[in-house]
Amino acid sequence: MLIVVVLLITVLMRFAIVTAAVYLLLPAGPLCPHCKIDMVPIKNWFFDRLLPALQRRWCLSCGWNGVVRRVRSAPKRTGKRSPRPIPR
Ligand SMILES: [Zn+2]
C-alpha cells in the first residue's frame, strides 16, 4: 500500500511541476511577444470561467494569437486632474 501512495505522490508532483513550467513559459501581459503591441482579448469560456489566470489574445498587427498570462493592470485614474500650469 505504501508503494502505491509513493507512486501517486510522485505522479502528482510531476503534474504540478509540468503545470508550473508551462505557466511560466507563457508570455505575460497584454503585449504581443513579437511586435510588443497591445493585443486584443478574445472571449473564451474555458479560460474566463475555469482558468482566470490565463487569457487568450490576438495581435492585430502580426496576427499572432495565443494564450497569455493575465497580469493585474494598474487602476486607471478616473478623477479629473487640474491642468498643469505652463512654466514661463
Ligand atoms: Zn504582434
Image (tube, helix red, strand yellow):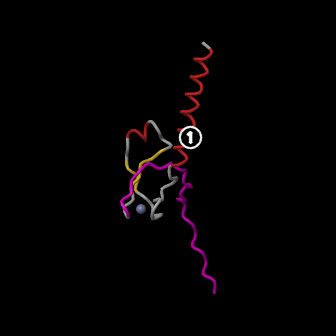
Residues in magenta? 62-88
Residue drawn at (55%, 47%), measured in percent from left and top? 24
Q: Residue lying farthest top?
A: 1
Left or right of 81 on screen, residue 39: left
Residue count near mark 1 (Cα–Cα under 10 Å), binned few <14, some 14–19, many ≥20: few
Residue 73 horizontal/vertical position (percent): 54, 54
> For this rendering, which residue is in front, 73 or 42?
42
Residue 75 horizontal/vertical position (percent): 55, 54
Q: Which residue is mark 1?
A: 20
Residue 23 horizontal/vertical position (percent): 53, 44
Main SS of the magenta segment?
loop
> For this rendering, which residue is in front, 30 or 35?
35
Residue 63: in magenta span = yes
> For this rendering, which residue is in front, 7 or 12?
7
Which quadrant of the figure has residue 39?
A: bottom left
> For this rendering, which residue is in front, 8 or 32?
8
Residue 80: in magenta span = yes
The correct choice, above or below, for 85 with respect to 34 in the image is below
Left or right of 8 on screen, residue 39: left
